[in-house]
């Protein structure tokens, strides 16, 4: 299976979503990528949110009430589950819709005239359905769902970034006017205060909510946590350092701050 749903406490509304931490690419998908092996490894170093699954796992261990986790087991170079699967996606402008055709540095990743639909059907839609089911499960169990997206981003902007000229704080919080309540944002600012400056919607903005709930169900709250990679690892694609533990503690504080 291309994703894992890792159970938490039955009465926890929190779902830690980790969509971009993996590097795995099935052989059939690899065949459609035009980069040679060395170039692909370099691209994975740049595009992968390395060690974010470990941060989420450690936070789950530390939290007083264990959150649920939804973890992508495949690279975002297979499909990016957080993109809109249609023309609403602004990253199409740089070849990074649900199925990427360009790299972080603008090189050809796949032929632009290829049909993305087989990858969307095999990987994107099942992932989206499973994530929607996980949210629905939390709603049924607790009456609400709180999605915390766990991401990372490079200290220096990469060419693909559409909004890379703005601030790049140690922690960027992505918000949505409908799904991010003020109390969740306040809790996140307090939880990550010890890491350094906490910014808002720069260099990355917004949150991920399954489309069947997006803009419709206020019981679904969401926040994106974007961690600058130099706070916990060697860039690009290198090992994690002691900062990982501090970030896990901060994320656990955020989980525990969500009212039960």
Image (cartoon, rainbow, N blue to C red):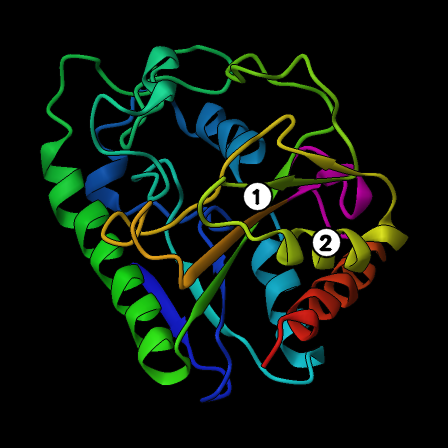
Q: Is residue 126 magenta?
A: no
Q: Position of residue 85 (x, y in %)?
A: 22, 33
Q: Position of residue 130 (x, y in %)?
A: 25, 63
Q: Nearer the viewer, residue 216 or 121?
A: 216
Does 252 appear above or below 191?
A: below
Residue 49: which disc? 1
Q: Is residue 21 visible?
A: yes
Which quadrant does the N terminus fall into?
A: bottom left
Q: Is residue 1 visible?
A: no
Q: Is residue 185 left or right of residue 204?
A: right
Q: Nearer the viewer, residue 203 or 114?
A: 203
Q: Are marks 2 and 1 in contact (CB under 8 Å)?
A: no
Quadrant housing residue 246: bottom right
Which quadrant does the C terminus fall into?
A: bottom right
Residue 155: which disc? none
Give the residue displayed 54% in from the left and 76% down from the top: 67
Give the residue displayed 49% in from the left and 53% down from the top: 222
Residue count near mark 1 (Cα–Cα under 10 Å), binned few <14, some 14–19, many ≥20: many
In this rendering, which labeled residue sits more in front, label 2 or label 1? 2
Find numbered disc 1 in the image and state the secondary structure of the residue it sits on: loop
* Residue picked out by circle 2: 186
Which SS type dominates the magenta stretch? loop
Q: Position of residue 143 (x, y in %)?
A: 39, 77
Mark positioned earlier in the residue sequence (2 or 1): 1
Magenta region: 226-241
Whole-angstrom CA distance, mark 2 to mark 1, is 24 Å
């Amino acid at each position: 299976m291309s994703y894992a749903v890792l159970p938490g406490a039955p009465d926890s509304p929190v779902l830690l979503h980790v969509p971009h931490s993996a590097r795995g690419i099935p052989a059939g998908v690899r065949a459609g990528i035009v980069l040679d092996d060395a170039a692909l490894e370099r691209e994975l170093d740049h595009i992968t949110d390395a060690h974010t699954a470990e941060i989420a796992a450690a936070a789950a261990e530390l939290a007083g009430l264990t959150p649920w986790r939804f973890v992508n087991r495949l690279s975002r170079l297979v499909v990016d589950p957080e993109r809109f699967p249609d023309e609403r996606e602004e990253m199409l402008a740089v070849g990074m819709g649900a199925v990427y055709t360009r790299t972080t540095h603008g090189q050809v990743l796949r032929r632009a005239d290829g049909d993305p639909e087989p990858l969307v059907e095999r990987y994107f839609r099942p992932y989206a359905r499973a994530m929607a089911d996980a949210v629905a499960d939390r709603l049924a169990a607790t009456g609400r769902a709180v999605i915390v997206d766990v991401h990372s981003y490079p200290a220096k902007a990469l060419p693909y970034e559409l909004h890379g000229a703005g601030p790049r704080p140690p922690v960027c919080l992505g918000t949505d006017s409908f799904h991010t309540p003020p109390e969740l944002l306040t809790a996140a600012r307090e939880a990550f205060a010890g890491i350094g400056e906490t910014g808002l919607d720069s260099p990355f903005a917004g949150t991920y909510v399954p489309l069947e709930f997006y803009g419709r169900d206020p019981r679904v709250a969401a926040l994106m946590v974007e961690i600058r990679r130099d706070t916990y690892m060697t860039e690009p694609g290198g090992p994690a350092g002691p900062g990982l533990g501090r970030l896990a503690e901060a994320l656990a504080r955020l989980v525990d701050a969500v009212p039960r």
